[in-house]
Amino acid sequence: MDTVTVISERRLEAVPTAPVSSAKTLTVTATYLLSEDGRKASLLDGGDGKALQQLSLEVPANRLHLVSVDAQGVARLKLRPRYQLDGDRGIVRIDAAPTYDAPPDVEELFREAARNHQLERAYGAERQAARIKRREGDQERRTAVARAFLSDPSKRAVTYPAPSAQRCVVETDQGRIFFDAKADVSPARDVPAEALRRFQADLRGRREQNLKVRADQLALHEEKKQFAAEWIAVHGTSDQQARQAAGVLPIEEAIEAIAEHAFSVVSDRRRYLPDAVSRVRAALDSRGERGTTVSPSDISINGSNAETMTAAQWTVVNELRTLLPDATVALRIHKISWKRDPSLAITPAFGVLVSQRIGPFTVRREFEANDHRAAK
């Protein structure tokens, strides 16, 4: 790696100047700025007093390193950009011409250009060294990420863009890293091929899993159809049996018949009927907002298992458990909120949810949480 020699202001001031005389000279433009004091001094010396000053100089051949020539062939003394030593920051570049408090003489301009020339070379060397260091650090990081990826079969490249044999993208704690099989060196260049192999293996695995799930679903559907047909043949009405024999009985009707039969022992129990709209209206009435329009779309209901029970609710739950010993019985609380005013206090609703497994079917009924029987 290149090293940069530390340059002090004293060394810059001590740069010797070559004799001005030379056989050949080049006419160049020196551009600099005058401060307010410098503009006053310029006027006192008979100058134009302008902030921007341009001076034509004859530069001998042995000082042409102090001159820059642009693509249009315009030669300028190296006064802009300027380079300065700035403590811990090292050499800094300033994109402005130097500013003087008094009109400088030619030798002072030459010294400034020589100082700029020397610092420019050191500045370039520092930047080159920094670029090399960043490049080496980036390469070390890429190598570490590549080794970690290749050694851990659980790691994956991002799926968008999808990895290919030549390129892939790997997500890291410091951001994404792009790997290219042609541009990278080993082991980084091996990452795209391995990422593609794992990506394709995942696709095959998901496809196989989806096919298995689909096959299981079809098998379960056939099992349900067979069970429903057999159940209707034994327990269905003559009309249902006739339609089943003709293949036109909806399976939903068969499931409803199975549920009715499963819950026949509790047929006298009153079913839970959602009454969220009436509860919201009651809450609005109690707040003095009678007549407010309440739409079902403005209501949100969040159901969950209740953590506590009243004595009446406990009695209902245990009665249902006794009557349906193979069923799952749970007290449900339905918390209601009005989207137009979530702060509105609304009394929650309760229901007892009973679930039973009948062959391949799970049938459910929700009953009122209070000990009421249906009217005879």
Image (cartoon, helix red, strand yellow):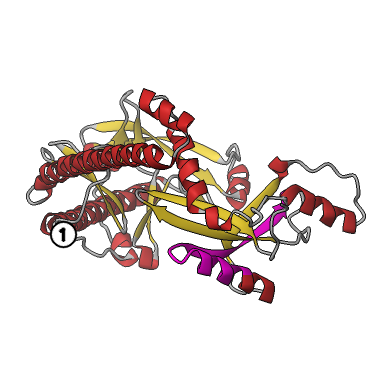
Question: From the viewer's perspective, is residue 16 above or below residue 49?
Answer: below
Which residue extends farthest left?
186
Q: Quadrant of residue 279?
A: bottom right
Q: Which residue is mark 1?
A: 148
* Quadrant where the N terminus is found in the figure: bottom left
Q: Identify the residue at image location x=71%, y=54%.
A: 337
Task: Using a 10 Å C-alpha cutoff, classify the residue at mark 1 as few (fewer than 14 neighbours), some (14 to 19) or many (20 or more).
Answer: few
Residue 329 part of the magenta-drawn span: yes
In this rendering, does residue 156 appear at all?
A: yes
Helix, strand or loop at mark 1: helix
- Residue type indicated by callout 1: Ala
Q: Can residue 101 be seen by looking at this rendering? A: no
Q: Could you say where residue 258 lies in the image, as x and y percent from the top left? A: 46, 45
Seen as rendered, the residue at the extreme bottom is 311
| Image-based side of 192 in relation to 233, left or right | left
The residue drawn where x is 12% and y is 36% is: 165
Left or right of residue 147, residue 92 in this image = right
Task: Describe residue 333's horizontal placement relative to residue 110 as left or right.
Answer: right
Q: Which residues are drawn in magenta?
A: 316-339
Q: Is residue 17 magenta?
A: no
Q: Position of residue 307 (x, y in %)?
A: 58, 72
Q: Is residue 123 above or below residue 202?
A: below
Q: Is residue 51 rendered to the left or right of residue 181? A: right
Residue at image point 47% right, 50% down: 363
Q: How many marks?
A: 1
Q: Position of residue 78 (x, y in %)?
A: 35, 42
